[in-house]
Amino acid sequence: MKEIDFEHKMAAHCESGTVTALLNHAGLEITEPMVFGIASGIFFGYFESSNFSFPMFIVRNKPGSIRKNIAKRLGVKFYTKSFRKSEKGIEELDRLLEEGRPVATQVDFYYMEYMPEYTRTHMNVHFINVIGKNEKNYLVSDSYYKEKAHLRQELLNKARFVGGHMAPKGFLFYPEYIPQDVDFETAIRKGIKKASHDMIKLPVPFVGVKGIRKFAKKVTGWPELARDIDHLSHEIMKINVFLEDQGTGGAGFRFLYATFLQQAAQKLNDTQLEGMSKKMMSIGDDWRNISYFAAKIGKQRDLGEERLNELSGMIYAMADKEQEFFTELYKMVK
Amino acid sequence: MKEKEAQISFDMHPLVLYVEKEDGTYGRVESASYLSKNYLEDYFEKVRKWDKELKDQLDKGEISPVYYYMTMLEMGEGDLASRAGIPKWKLKKHLKMDAFEKINLRMLRRYADVFDIPVSNLLHFTVIKEKDQDKLKITYQKSSNNPYISVSKIEIK
């Protein structure tokens, strides 16, 4: 077994987790919340599309943006490559591992067979670090798994080269250049500015706080889209999954973002930001309550009009809170 | 969220939460899925129920096996069509039996690959009685030379 000496650590989120681990490995000391915040990871969007079996929402920016924004704001250069032919992609990954480089790659989560079966859905934007290989397996460091995991070669190859919505095309990356001096202050302010801007100012009706309102409005109509009460219950309980279980650090990334703001406040010695981090933690608590509420009413099949209106009201309140929050935050870094 | 509220243990589904620690700083703790810990059985019950209902519909010829697997795997039509490499309108037809029965083997194989099952499973279910499910399991092995041929093995766990 060729195994690269690599520190494995669970992380809140797969993309910020892989990027953080690779940067740490390359000698840049940085935390996951810092990576997430500088990369303007926090977001919201409500989507209805035939790529999903039911309406869904996201609580982070577009997959791939964490790496791109980190590169732009910290001056790190990533080697990136995707492939039309799987053979080339497999060859390239093996070559890099042979050189002793841990490499991040994009995969369909479904094939990560070390994860519990019930969590494994077809989702093409999972990121893992590959850190070794033997005759049968790749050795991977997955932010969602406690230990380093063995993944059969055949499965990783499938996971990297499946088709579908946002097909991975074997995409891989690693940092090839880390600057000597990083200007964290500018990076932090730019990261905050972009995130706040996108939450309150994008002229698109289903993203940012407008997206939260759209979600609040639409959720009361979900019964018409569901096959029956059990299906409706399942979709309502998935609100909890999206907010808590799909690699968010809790409360749809709001706890992670609060942590970023606190670390940013300390780095910049900025008491205003410290105050904002407390507010974000409290906003996170409110989202977490929505998660608990959704799980409870889903389990009890207590999904009549009145209860869904109550849920909708809780979500509308989040839109108001986040509008106020990000407006204030935007002014601070403008 | 305070650290003590994050003390959830559920080995099957660990995850990282960011919380307020005792000293007021925010940071990571290894916790677990609250939903899995408390409501997993409810989820499995639903899945069993859907499985039964959809198989009844299959039995009556109301839906096709493609519809069955798409629904059980919670895949969107657009995503499935793109994974199978066909236009969406064609996929929609394949959700019903009258178009499904005209599918050729090669098309069937594309669906089987997406659903990660042997081709034969699109036309056949092997089921273990509920009382024996703790003792027995089924595994599938595809022939490495002929993608249409597979072997199902029923083994003692």
Image (cartoon, coloured by chain):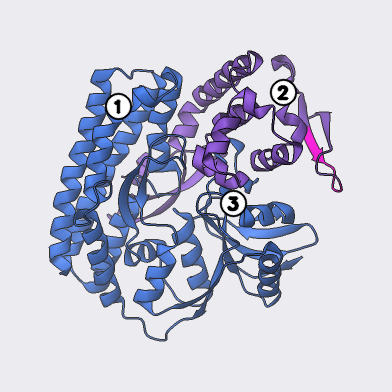
Chain colours: A blue, B purple
Residue A74 percent across, percent down from the top left: 37, 77
- Residue holding disc 2: B134
Mark closer to the observer (1, 2): 1
Residue A244 percent across, percent down from the top left: 40, 42
User: In the figure, A288 relative to B62: above or below?
Assistant: below
Q: How far apart are marks 1 and 3 (CA)?
A: 32 Å
- Residue holding disc 3: A163
Q: Which amino acid does label 3 sit on?
A: Gly
A154 vs A104, left or right, is right
- Front residue of this view, candidates B142 and B149: B149
Kindly identify the residue that appears in the image at 56 percent across and 42 percent down: B81
Residue B106 percent across, percent down from the top left: 74, 41
- Residue holding disc 1: A221
Marks 1/3 in contact by CB < 8 Å: the verdict is no
- Quarter of the image where one finds residue A183: bottom left
Q: Which mark is residue A80?
A: none
User: In the figure, B18 relative to B50: above or below?
Assistant: below
User: In the figure, A106 relative to A298: above or below?
Assistant: below
Element assignment for label 3: loop
B137 vs A120, left or right, is right
Kindly identify the residue that appears in the image at 77 percent across and 30 percent down: B138
Element assignment for label 1: helix
A212 vs B79, left or right, is left
What residue range appears in magenta?
B139-145
Query: Are labels 1 and 2 on one chain?
Result: no
Q: Which of marks 1 and 3 is nearer the N terminus?
A: 3
